[in-house]
Amino acid sequence: MQTLHFSVHINAPVEKVWDTMLADATYRQWTAAFCPGSHYRGSWEQGSEIRFIGPNPDGSGNGGVVSCIRENRLHEFISVEHLGLIENDVEDTTSEKVKGWVGAHENYTFTAVDGGTDLQIDTDTEESFVAMFNDMWPKALHALKELAEK
């Protein structure tokens, strides 16, 4: 497992960046950089399960990740722990395939700086996904920046 780090400065207050990142309608917009149609089901509340879902490219259902919000400090920090995968609308938290993924975290840190927000993303991933995330995360953060600065 490798931890990747991404950051962006957004010219908007922390509260607006937080809301833009997590609200359903805008979440769907900035996460389209990962997969058009991406969305979540569940809650961002600490201790809640949440599913990050997107359509499979071949139209065979949905894929995604089953996760838990391990920590949520309003307008400061969110820690998401991944518990398993979703393939063709079926959750898998026990197979050999997901064992390397279970326990991976995505952490979002929001810091107020000069009227704007520094957003730091730290995400655990398997080696086979590093190049993909190195391409997609900057695009997603650029889209989030544009949305929050409107």
Image: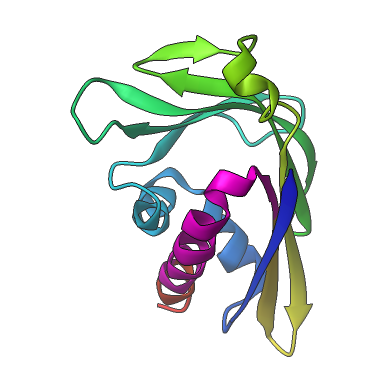
Q: Position of residue 144 (x, y in %)?
A: 47, 67
> Which residue is rendered at x = 63% and y = 14% of the image?
96
Instruction: State how many labels appear.
Output: 0
Taking the image as shown, residue 47 lies to the left or right of residue 11, namely: right
- Observer-nearest residue: 25 or 55? 55
* Position of the C terminus by quadrant: bottom left
Magenta span? 123-143
Question: Would you say residue 125 is visible in this rendering?
Answer: yes
List the single residue furthest toward the bottom: 114
- Where residue 83 sits, quadrant-wise, is top right
Tell me residue 58's x, y (percent).
19, 30
Does residue 121 appear anywhere in the picture? Answer: no
In the rendered image, the quadrant that contains the N terminus is top right
Q: Residue at x 41, y 59 (%)?
A: 30
Describe residue 73's horizontal placement relative to residue 44 as left or right: right
Check the image and report above or below for 69 versus 17.
above
Q: Nearer the viewer, residue 135 or 42?
A: 135
Residue 132 in magenta? yes
As rendered, which of 91 and 109 lies closer to the eye?
91
Residue 99: image quadrant is: top right
**Residue drawn where x is 50% and y is 68% of the image:** 141
Q: Is 127 included in the stretch rendered in magenta? A: yes
Q: Is residue 8 above or below residue 24?
A: below
Location of residue 141 with respect to 46 vertically, above or below: below
